[in-house]
Amino acid sequence: MSSAIDPQGRESRDIPAPSFPAAEPPRTPVRARTPLDPQDFAARTVTEPGSLEAQVALELFSTHHQEARAYATRLRRLATLWDDTDEDGDAYADLVAEARRVTLDQARTLLRDAALAVTSLPHTLERLDAGHMPVSWFEQILRRVRHLTPEQCRQLDDRVADWDLANIRRDRFTRELGILIAWFGVAATRPSPQEQRAVALEVNPEHDGTACLHLTGPVHEIVDLSHRLDAAARAVQDEQRRALADGRPVPFDIDGAASREGRHLTLAALRYAILTRSVLETGGIEAPGSWLRLQVVVPAMTLLGESEAPGTIDGTIPLPAPMARHLAAGESTWYRILTDPSDGAFLPLPAKRYSPTLAMQEHLRLLNPVCAVPGCTRNTCTIGEADHIEEYDHENPENGGRTAIENLHRLCWKHHRLKTLGLLDPVREPDGSTTWILYGRAVRRERQNTDLLTPALAEALQRSWEIYEETLVWDEARHRGLLEDADPAPLPDPAPHPEPPF
């Protein structure tokens, strides 16, 4: 409730103040653009339709349904052995360990997961039993809901079971599941990301002479370390290439392999060498910092504390809302990404300008953080390349493709090379969609994401504005004394419009 003082100093009667309901995860319609057709598998790749390889792919796909049903049946059978009074799951763990030929700890996990699937994820389990999703997807759900409350599991189950599981692709499923999990603020049920900073050594249980060093910490710190390590490795690789050409000693030559073989080391080997031998010191070689910012995108309503929509790192990694707000609070400069309708549009560069501006590059990264080629999930925020859809004519720039947002997208280096070789040919249609042509055959039509102001966010902002306008009307009525003898009609409760993170 709220009250106001009119110019004569009289206190007006209380009226309901606008309030926002507690946020729940949105029921986002996760639907595939086109139905999944196994006959299209070959067309999406470089495999010849009708070939032996294409037939093997079809046979592999056909096994998903049988495996999913068998797994659902096994979960239900295992659940009958779960004892609700035994929190450790030891009652029949020995029996399950013998039957499944696994360790005791693995048997306990099998029993707990089976009970969780049957009691907390019944609707999604039915979709699994119907063969609408592969086993690995359901296993991923089980791993990620172990720290959720029963009510949170129920909400997740209702939403995931309503997705188009039979047709969406793996990367879409993983991304949407990550966003949904982030809504629940899992960080509240476990130590904060800062408290979990740790480095742990794990020796390979097969004792093959290898070990693994696990680095755990806040996701933005780990991603930034990965970016810096990658930039250093690429700088060293370039110097190795020049040293081999000039006959000079090769820097960071692990065990002399580059000198013996006459070729630079792989990026994986160089990342390892730099990390283990120099702690990112590159022996005098200048490792350039990334010219791209590490993008932490925080929805406006999340910043205002009116929504628990998660943020993202580089457009693909979900970031819990509290952590997103914490990162935003620590920054002195914020960058607005919602373009102003009067002057926010990018104008085409002069015909002789080939390279997009840095602002255009960043705008493209926000629109499409992964490679634009259908089915490719490579993140292009760090090493992707801007590409002209209609080729730029270097000899006669005025005749070539424009350097404009409408004629640009980002590709990973592999698909950029295939496009340069003429094996991929995108065609931007008048409606903004892109038709991809592979070996002269149209294989996929993708619609470009052209609006950073998402429909859900637009609805939430519109609803907030309507509430504000109605509040002004009641304030004016009180000021004029029109509410002396009548109770004001209550303001309508705003319907929940949780905003997605993109």
Image: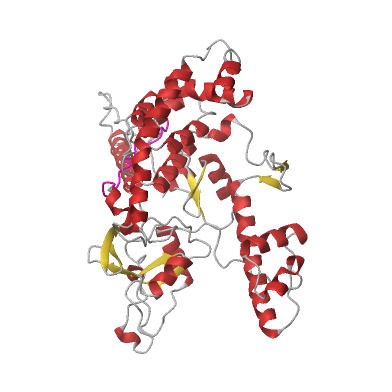
Of all residues shown, which one is farthest toward the top?
Answer: 85
Q: Nearer the viewer, residue 53 or 267?
A: 53
Placement of 203 over or under 420, stated as above or below: above
Left/right of residue 64 with respect to residue 185 in the rendered view: left
Placement of 387 over or under 470, stated as above or below: below
Left/right of residue 271 with respect to residue 72 in the rendered view: right
Span highlighted in magenta in the image: 22-36
Q: Position of residue 323 (x, y in %)?
A: 56, 43
Q: Position of residue 336 (x, y in %)?
A: 45, 58
The residue located at (37%, 39%) in the rendering is 63
Determine which quarter of the picture holds residue 400. Answer: bottom left
Q: Within the magenta stretch, is there residue 25?
A: yes
**Is residue 76 at least partly visible in the picture?**
yes
The residue located at (35%, 60%) in the rendering is 47
Determine which quarter of the picture holds residue 18. Answer: top left
Placement of 444 over or under 179, stated as above or below: below
Q: Nearer the viewer, residue 476 or 268?
A: 268
The residue located at (44%, 18%) in the rendering is 77
Of all residues shown, which one is farthest toward the front?
Answer: 52
Q: Within the magenta stretch, is there residue 85?
A: no
Determine which quarter of the picture holds residue 179. Answer: top left
Left/right of residue 264 with respect to residue 412 in the rendered view: right
Placement of 410 over or under 99, stated as above or below: below
Q: Position of residue 449 (x, y in %)?
A: 34, 57
How would you classify the magenta stretch by its main secondary structure? loop
Of all residues shown, which one is farthest toward the bottom?
Answer: 395
Left/right of residue 142 with respect to residue 396 in the rendered view: right
Q: Position of residue 46 (x, y in %)?
A: 37, 62
